[in-house]
Image (cartoon, rainbow, N blue to C red):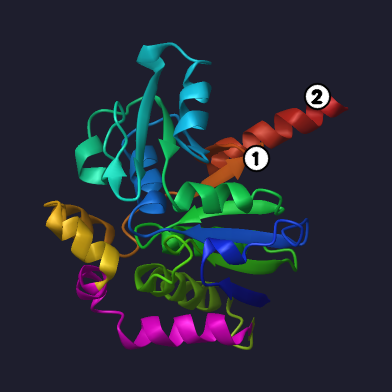
Amino acid sequence: MKIHLLLKKEEIDSAQMNDDKIAVVFDVLLATSTITASLNYGADRVIPVMDEAEAISEAENYLSEEIALVGEYNGITIDGFMNPAPSTLKGQLKEKTVILSTTNGTVAIRRSAPAKKVYIASLLNGEAVSKRIASTYEDETIVVVCSGSSNQFCMEDFYGAGYFISQLVNESGMTNADLTDSALSAKLFYENLSHYAFQVLSDTRVGKMLKKYNLQEDIELVSQQGVLAIVPRLIDGKTIVLEKEAEASLEKQNLGGK
């Protein structure tokens, strides 16, 4: 098993994200944590968009009561959108389609779309995603993507990626897994600070910004490790659903093709 790590979304080469790659995208503060929480709150699906304009365009395909427009740009909630902090969304998303626009995380997901499979991971569900990949692995290269922030490295994504890689190596039983230096560095970084998730996230630049906006509750929420058995997966290049629904959708497409 070969595991590679990209330190920011700007390192994604969509041409290299092909049928022999599995992408696992992290934006711990907050996009991928928000997506995981949204599906846990009962959302039917999440549509990650590139920007506000695409979100508004996508919303035109639905009745207003069917969707929740959620988004931020440069850390500020977009006018007319819901705040993407998970604590503010609880109780508001059941059976809705969430159209999510963020500065970094949703962009990283979309750029990773050409991969054979694209999983959305966070500290909340990293263990569940690692178990799923370990049980379905077919000799693909695992590309772990840290979204970063506007072309800058983010320690919280590096920490989350390290958590996932550590879990995946343990779940697969491949103690001799082929880790690139970046992947190994993240794994060792996490393993040395595994009991300090809240402190690590709080001390980051984005963490400090969230505290400034009185969102410390969200840092506490998303710093929990392995508490959700949710495996979100991107299908059709634009829609995130739970893995079981993704498999059912792909099976239906295959039957239709026959």
Mark sitting earlier along the chain (2/1):
1
Q: Is residue 23 above or below residue 46?
A: below
Looking at the rendered image, the quarter that the N terminus falls into is bottom right
Residue 102 point in image, percent of width and height: 41, 45
The residue sitting at 34% across, 50% down in the picture is: 74
Is the C-beta separation of discs 2 and 1 under 8 Å? no
Q: CA distance from mark 2 to mark 1?
A: 19 Å
Q: Is residue 197 magenta?
A: yes
Q: Is residue 64 magenta?
A: no
Asked whether, in this view, residue 208 is left or right of residue 123, the answer is: left
Which is nearer the eye, 254 or 80? 80
The boundaries of the magenta stretch are: 179-203
Q: Residue at x 27, y 71 (%)?
A: 204
Q: Is residue 241 above or below residue 194?
A: above
* Label at residue 77: none
Residue pictured at 54% horizontal, 61% vertical:
9
Mark identifier at residue 256: 2
The secondary element bearing badge 2 is classed as helix
Residue 82 location (% of width, % of height): 28, 32
Residue 124 percent coordinates (x, y): 34, 58
Helix, strand or loop for the magenta stretch, by majority? helix
Residue under label 1: 237
Quick one: label 2, few (<14), some, or many (20+) residues within 10 Å?
A: few
Please say whether residue 189 is visible from this viewpoint: yes
Q: How crowded is the residue under tag 1: few (<14 C-alpha within 10 Å), some, or many (20+)?
A: some
Work out whether 109 lies above or below 12.
above
Q: Position of residue 251 (x, y in %)?
A: 72, 34
Q: Is residue 224 visible?
A: no
Q: Say whether residue 28 is left or right of residue 187.
A: left
Residue type pointed to by label 1: Gly
